[in-house]
Image (cartoon, rainbow, N blue to C red):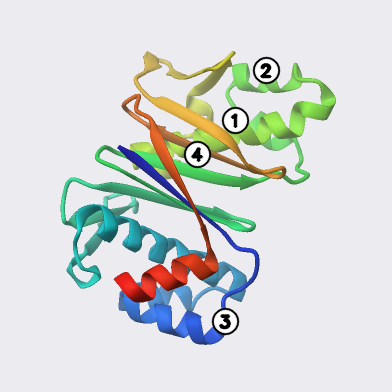
Amino acid sequence: MIEIHILQMQNHIKQTDYNKLLGYITKDKIERLGRFHRFEDAQRSLLGDILARYAICSREKVENENLTFGKNEYGKPLLIKPDGIHFNISHSGNFVVCAIHNNPIGVDVETIRRIDFTIAENYFSREEYDALLGQPEEMRLYYFFIIWALKESYIKAEGKGLNIPLNSFTIKMEGHSINCVNSKGQMKYCFEQGLLDNKTIFAFCTMDKISATKKYWTIEEILEETYSWL
């Protein structure tokens, strides 16, 4: 079963809570958090890690200190111990999202904002770019971020990141169907996308068609669960 954990940040966490949460993560992660210039970015990254740890511990009935993480050759975070569980994290704006599955999975969150559409010309396939230009002007920005989130979720599920050029494959949206096609034909991936609020899009990608359960969290709720569980 796919589990999607969605944390909405209505406000910042207190510095005392931030410092306490650091005790649940690795020294390497703490060092990386220290490189952020903005507290908001460090906070989202920390909460993503905490959300993943809670979701994995809750699902697998293991203790936080027994989790071992690593990275693949492309830098994608992996759960090494216990094995057999895949996860992915994304955050943007007021949302942090973590996806958990038995098979590789990718998730992406995008805040809808004004952009220069030449980005699409550079990073979308020709078919995607033509489809974008074919949208009504008032829907074009929304459509751009749907395609962008779906593309990001795919390369994250593949675990190769931007080693897969974004314009080397095409996301096709036909009615309620979403497919991914490259030069070799249609790929066996399943997608889901939706709105978290009126300006935030999320998408996830995995290799098998299976329903996902979604759990929504507030900061207060995840802090309470973390302190009592991890």
Between 70 and 204, the one lying in front of the other is 204
Q: Are there few (<14), some (14-19), or many (20+) residues within 10 Å of tag 3? A: few
Residue 152: mark: 4
* Sequence-wise first label, 3 or 2: 3
Tag 1 residue: 147
Between 210 and 119, the one lying in front of the other is 210
Residue 14: mark: 3
Which label lies toward us, 3 or 2? 3
Which label lies toward us, 4 or 3? 3
* Sequence-wise first label, 2 or 4: 2
Q: CA distance from mark 3 to mark 2?
A: 45 Å
Tag 2 residue: 131
* Sequence-wise first label, 4 or 3: 3
- Against 115, residue 31 (above or below) is below
Q: Residue at x 45, y 28 (%)?
A: 191
Q: Secondary structure at mark 1?
A: helix
Amino acid type, residue under disc 3 in the picture: Lys
* Sequence-wise first label, 1 or 3: 3
